[in-house]
């Protein structure tokens, strides 16, 4: 039993160390909402992965902050809970807004794990001390630059290279990378940029031995993905279109893909992410942990989730130093030879850098029961 006695909302803006281009557009910074829950002298921290504008899914930072302030936090503050799933149940009557709800649920998992003195991954059922990691590479100016950035990351030991693609930037860069690196584990991510009219273009990618093609069609679609999968030999990986374990079951039953990208915030928190993991495992479909350019808080949550047994493909939990000159946590999250050590200690095992966050925060608000 634990009680959420108080909460803090913090928002920081972190400049990226590189220009990150996808089919959505170009990103040079990340606005990071953070939620801190307090109880029995312990703090649990989570990170929101919604964007400023509804590009990835329908949620936005402004909408999430409004819901947290006026609806979600008042529902949980001052209440005793037997476990974090009970926190999720307290918010279960609200539709959608899974990323905002996940902020509360994930911070509650961290709080509870710290009170119990147990690493979050162990509490979720994971047993790994390190997880395999890959890297997600944005769209580059040309094919030569693409091959060059891939080479740098292959030399750093990453165990999967993922290329962002879009119509007009797909077959050529993938061919160039595959010719330069015939043996690497290579994937592509379309972020919903294609339609069934592009089937011929996507079928051409079958020639390059990809592990999967990630979310080529609409963000909320499962039916067209099933049609496309029937025309391709490369497995499709479902990302945006899986917002719950039910979505995962439907997509796998329809044959919409053979791999699932599990983003813990997208599905509403750790409890639902674990259910997605279990459903995929029952279908014999591997999962991996996707990333949303998280700071060290969200990255640590992702690492712990990735310790579950069906996370058998390298995830997007690459070294934090790739992204930030200064992270929001005191610890470093750095991969070696494609392996990311699981942070040690209770909860996520990382500590918010209070001095840095206080100095750069654009929003600092406190709430009490």
Image (cartoon, rainbow, N blue to C red):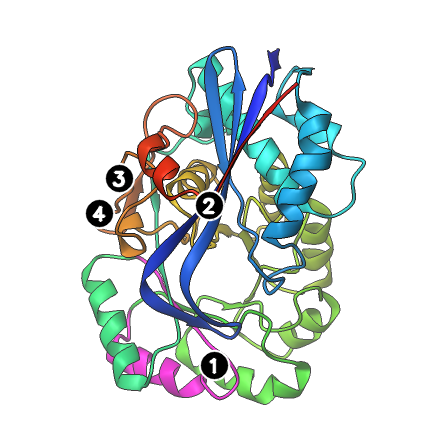
Q: Which residue corresponds to mark 4?
A: 336
Q: Which mark is residue 205?
A: 1
Q: Nearer the viewer, mark 3 or mark 1?
A: 3
Q: Residue at x 53, y 85 (%)?
A: 167
Going by the image, does 186 lie left or right of 79?
Answer: left
The 10 Å Cα crowd at callout 2, few under 14, some 14 to 19, many 20 or more, is some
The residue where tag 3 is placed is: 332
Q: Is residue 279 in view from this perspective?
A: no
Q: Is residue 252 visible?
A: yes
Of labels 2 and 4, the one closer to you: 2
Q: Which numbered circle lies on residue 362?
A: 2
Image depth: mark 3 or mark 4 in front: 3
Q: For mark 4, does the 10 Å Cα neighbourhood hold few (<14), some (14 to 19), or many (20 or more) residues? A: some
In x, y percent, where is residue 217?
63, 73
Q: Is residue 248 above or below residue 344?
A: below
Q: CA distance from mark 3 to mark 1?
A: 37 Å
Give the foreground label among 1 and 4.
Answer: 4
Q: CA distance from mark 1 to mark 4?
A: 30 Å
Instruction: Looking at the image, tell me whether mark 3 or mark 2 is earlier in sequence order.
Output: 3
Q: Are marks 3 and 4 in contact (CB under 8 Å)?
A: no
């Amino acid at each position: 039993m634990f009680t959420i006695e108080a909460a803090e909302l913090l928002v920081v803006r972190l400049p990226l160390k590189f220009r990150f281009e996808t089919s959505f557009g170009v990103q040079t910074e990340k606005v990071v909402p953070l939620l801190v829950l307090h109880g029995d002298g312990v703090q649990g921290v989570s990170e929101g992965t919604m964007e400023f504008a509804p590009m990835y899914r329908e949620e936005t930072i402004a909408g999430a902050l409004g819901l947290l302030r006026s609806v979600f936090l008042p529902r949980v503050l001052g209440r005793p809970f037997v476990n974090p799933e009970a926190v999720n149940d307290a918010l279960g009557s609200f539709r959608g807004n899974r990323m905002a709800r996940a902020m509360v649920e994930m911070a509650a998992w961290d709080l509870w794990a710290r009170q119990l003195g147990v690493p979050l991954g162990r509490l979720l059922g994971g047993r790994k001390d390190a997880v395999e990691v890959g890297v997600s590479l944005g769209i580059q100016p040309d094919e030569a630059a693409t091959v060059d950035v891939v080479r740098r990351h292959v030399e750093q030991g990453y165990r999967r290279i993922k290329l962002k693609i879009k119509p007009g930037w797909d077959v050529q860069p993938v061919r160039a990378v595959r010719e330069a690196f015939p043996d690497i584990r290579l994937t592509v991510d379309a972020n919903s940029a294609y339609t069934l009219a592009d089937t011929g273009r996507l079928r051409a990618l079958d020639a390059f031995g990809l592990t999967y093609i990630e979310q080529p069609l609409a963000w909320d679609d499962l039916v067209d993905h099933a049609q496309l999968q029937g025309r391709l030999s490369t497995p499709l990986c479902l990302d945006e279109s899986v917002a719950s374990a039910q979505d995962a079951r439907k997509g796998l039953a329809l044959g919409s893909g053979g791999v699932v990208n599990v983003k813990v915030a997208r599905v509403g928190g750790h409890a639902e992410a674990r259910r997605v993991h279990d459903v995929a495992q029952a279908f014999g479909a591997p999962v991996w942990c996707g990333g949303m350019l998280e700071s060290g808080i969200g990255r640590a949550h992702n690492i712990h989730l990735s310790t579950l047994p069906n996370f058998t493909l390298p995830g997007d939990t690459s070294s934090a130093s790739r992204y930030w000159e200064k992270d929001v946590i005191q610890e470093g999250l750095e991969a070696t030879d494609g392996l990311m050590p699981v942070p040690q200690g209770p909860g996520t095992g990382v500590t918010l850098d209070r001095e840095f966050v206080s100095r750069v925060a654009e929003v600092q608000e406190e709430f009490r029961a």
